[in-house]
Structure formats: C-alpha cells, structure tokens
Image (tube, rainbow, N blue to C red):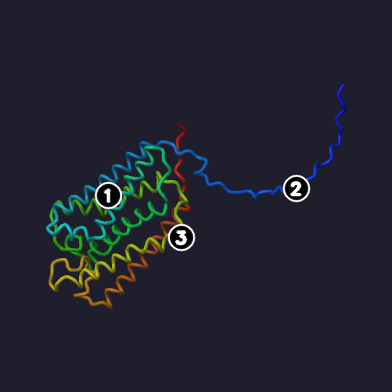
Amino acid sequence: MTAPIPRDIPDLPPIPGHVVLPPTVVPARAVLIPARRRPVAAFRGLIALLALTGVAIELLAADIPPTTALSHFTIQSGILLALVMLASARCAWSAHHPLPGALTGAALFYVIAAALVHHVLLAHASSPFATPDGTGTGTGTAWQTAATHILHTAVPVAAALDWLLLTPAGRLHLRQAPAWLLYPLAYLAFTLARGELLLPGAQDRYLYPFLDVAQHGYKIVLGNALLVGLALYALAVLLVALDHIRPTPVRRPR
C-alpha cells in the first residue's frame, strides 16, 4: 500500500538564483500568419498600372522635355505611389507582412497633396494661380488633359479607397506627419534652385505659378510655400486622425 497523500502540502522554498522574468509584450505580427489576399493584390496592381499610365502619357504627350516633366511633384508622387502599390500587391499576393504604415501613408499623402494643390490652386477658376489647363504650364493637349485627370483625380481616389477599404486601421501615427513634410520641403529647395540655375525667360523656369520667383519675388513665394506647408501638415494630421477613427476592414474567413 502507498502512503496517504497529506492534505496540506507545504510551500516549496524558492530555487536559489532563480530570476522571475517580467511579462513581455509580443507584437501581433510575430504570431499571426498573414493570409493571401489576391483580390487586394489585383486591385493594388491596377492602381500602380493606372499611375504609371498617367506618368507615361505625361512624358510622351507633353510638349516639354521629359526631364522637365519628371521634375513635377505630381509625376514624382505618382511614380512613388506606383512602386509602393506594386510592393504592397506582392505582399498581399505572397502572404507576406504588409509594408510599414509610414511608407504607405506617405505615398497616399503625397498623391492627395498633389491633387489638392491642382484642384484648389491650379485648376480652380477663382485661384490667382489658375492656368488654362490646370497643369501649371498653361499649355496642354487632349492626351495631357487625360494624364492630368488620371494623376490628379483617378489615382488619388483609387489610393484613398485602398486605404479606407483594404488597409488595417490604426497604422499611422502623429509622429510620422513631420517626417512626411521633409520631401515637400526638399522639393521646394529643388524647384527654387532649379529656377536660379536656368536662364531668365526660359520655358518652365519655375514649375508652379505660386513658386514663380521671377514674377512674385522671394518674399511672396516663401509666404506661399509656408501657407502650403501648413495646409499639408493639417492634411497629414487629418489622415492620421481618420486612420484611428475609421473601422478596420473585415476579412472574410477562408
């Protein structure tokens, strides 16, 4: 017969040298396996194709040198969005972890910023900087008009729909907003330096009317740049706020 088990078992003494580790927080991406999202990948691939189509039309159909067209903020932001969308499509197709929210948010921010500058400052009839075709150059063809609508309307709307309907919420943070403004600030320095290097009277010396130093002077141009910069920062803060109050898209069970 075995000995009876005592009802009260005394507590065992602690093991000498044993250190109790504090609880740690494991990020969700370390334990959750991403699922294939091929419809999402296809949609993002179409967005990239749309952006590249607009850029290609602008480069081939515009009556300005390709280097001048590539110097426009809209073209650069469109190329960046296309690259980000292609990378995001690959992640969704191959069940890889998504791209960092700071990168995807920046690409969305830049195309929306370019669209707002176009529609508010360049294409709006009441704007003092309005141009006949709304491109900032004052000249345009039917193909260039199509490229303008693609890059300033269709692409931003498609990118916003991808963000609202297909991207998890809460991935943008307020600390990212100042970093997003570094590229527009660098672009301002680039376009002003470019204008100084070109000869007076050269075509498209300054790429946007509100940055035309030859016509307005540095005081007014820098004031315009400050107002645009404040508006862009407000836009960045608004995107972050919307990202934290919008619902997360629901994934259907596989």
Dot 2 alpha-carbon crowd within 10 angstroms: few under 14, some 14 to 19, many 20 or more: few
Residue drawn at (40%, 64%) of the image? 234
Q: Which quarter of the image is occupied by the C terminus?
A: top left
Residue 16 is labelled as 2
Residue 115 at what x, y percent from top left? 29, 57
Q: Are marks 1 and 3 in contact (CB under 8 Å)?
A: no
What secondary structure is marked by label 1?
helix
1 or 3: tag closer to the N-terminus: 1
The picture places residue 174, in percent across and down from the top left corner, at 46, 60
Tell me the kind of residue under disc 1.
Ala
Rounded to the nearest angstrom, the CA distance separating label 2 from label 1 is: 68 Å
Relative depth, front residue between 89 and 167: 89
> Pointer 3: what residue?
174
Which comes sooner in the sequence, label 2 or label 1? 2
- Tell whether 64 sits left or right of 159: left
Left or right of 51 on screen, residue 180: right
Name the residue: 33% across, 49% down. 84
